[in-house]
Amino acid sequence: MAAQATTQDQAATRRRWLLLAPALTILIFAASGPLLITLVYSFLAPGAFGGVEWEFSTDAWFNVILQRDIFDDTLGWSDAHLSIFWRSVKLSLMTTLVCLILGFPTAYFIATRPKSQRELWMLLIIIPFWTNLLIRTFAILELIRNEGTVNTVLIGLGVIDEPIQMLFTEFAIIIGMVYVYLPLMVLPIYASMERLNFSLVEAGYDLYATRFQVLRRVILPLVKPGVIAGSILVFVPSLGAYVTPRVMGGGNQLMIGNLIELQFGQGRNWPLGAALSITLLAIVMVALIIYVRAVGDEEVRHG
């Protein structure tokens, strides 16, 4: 009997591995494989006309944040790369903050509507996802360009005499990314608010708490996981954004994604592009670790 049970267990184990095989194959060859290739490329020498030379080199990682002067061979900070890293983090944080400021009241508004109306409001939030990212970006470009809708209306009303230069600035990139990623902030906050027991909010008012006190002491602590999840969902893709900064920034306001594309394209320095890609991945992983720890601590406090 024991031998028969062992045979059945082994057969069940083989069936589970066979069922997992397609998923494991995809993970190894479609996810881990390209990442491993990128990591290997970052430790090779660049080819003369693109590609890589199979010679071990750490120059790519060295050039991520440092550079050597071509005249006296002295070391110094790579100001261009550091400024692009700083701009990417700054714009991503500002995009996340603006999305939170707009997304929180939007989610609260939807969560407090009658159940029969919530699906309609959520549909309006999701509809932009049905359109291609490039089309959405060009729609914003049409609004804020010099001859666009905003400037035309302001000139028509006599508010301004000349068009306001909004395109090809950091402001334009933030507007574009907020428009693109706002639904990613609204959805998780709404999911948290939908589970919120609003009788607690009413109890706060019954205890003579002001609206701000109810928001700070009752609502925000209970929907904090949704706020953190939305912030991560907006911050991570903003950090690696390529299309929106390219179109709205006009090549003058590069972000990390644009810098990586530049190294693999015109720069023909694939190892440096690979090292920058791994650096971007490391920044994203740090953000995710912060999110996981924040949510974990919150769950521990709530039992």
Image (spheres, rainbow, N blue to C red):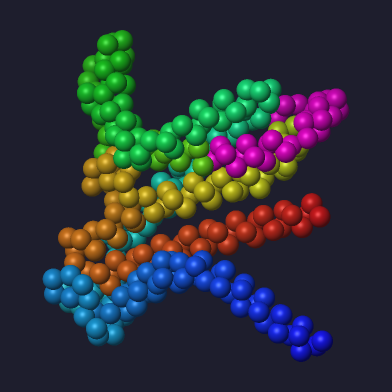
Against 248, residue 64 (above or below) is below
Image quarter in which the C terminus is found:
bottom right
Q: Is 179 or 173 nearer to us in this picture?
A: 179
Residue 46 falls within the magenta-colored stretch:
no
Q: Is 165 or 21 nearer to us in this picture?
A: 21
Whether residue 61 sits left or right of residue 186 in the image: it is left
At 70% from the left edge and 30% from the top edge, which residue is drawn?
Answer: 212
Residue 189 falls within the magenta-colored stretch:
yes
Whether residue 191 sits left or right of residue 78 in the image: it is right
Q: Is 168 or 292 nearer to us in this picture?
A: 292
- Give the x, y percent position of residue 129: 44, 37
Q: Is residue 102 visible?
A: no
Q: Quadrant of residue 79?
A: bottom left
Whether residue 228 sits left or right of residue 283 in the image: it is right
Predominant secondary structure, magenta span: helix
Give the magenta part as a residue range: 185-212
At 22% from the left edge and 20% from the top edge, which residue is drawn?
Answer: 162
Q: Is residue 12 visible?
A: yes
State the residue lying farthest toward the bottom. 3
- Give the x, y percent position of residue 106: 57, 29
At 45% from the left edge and 41% from the top edge, which residue is drawn?
Answer: 181
Image quarter in which the N terminus is found:
bottom right
Whether residue 20 sits left or right of residue 238 in the image: it is right
- Give the x, y percent position of residue 10: 67, 82
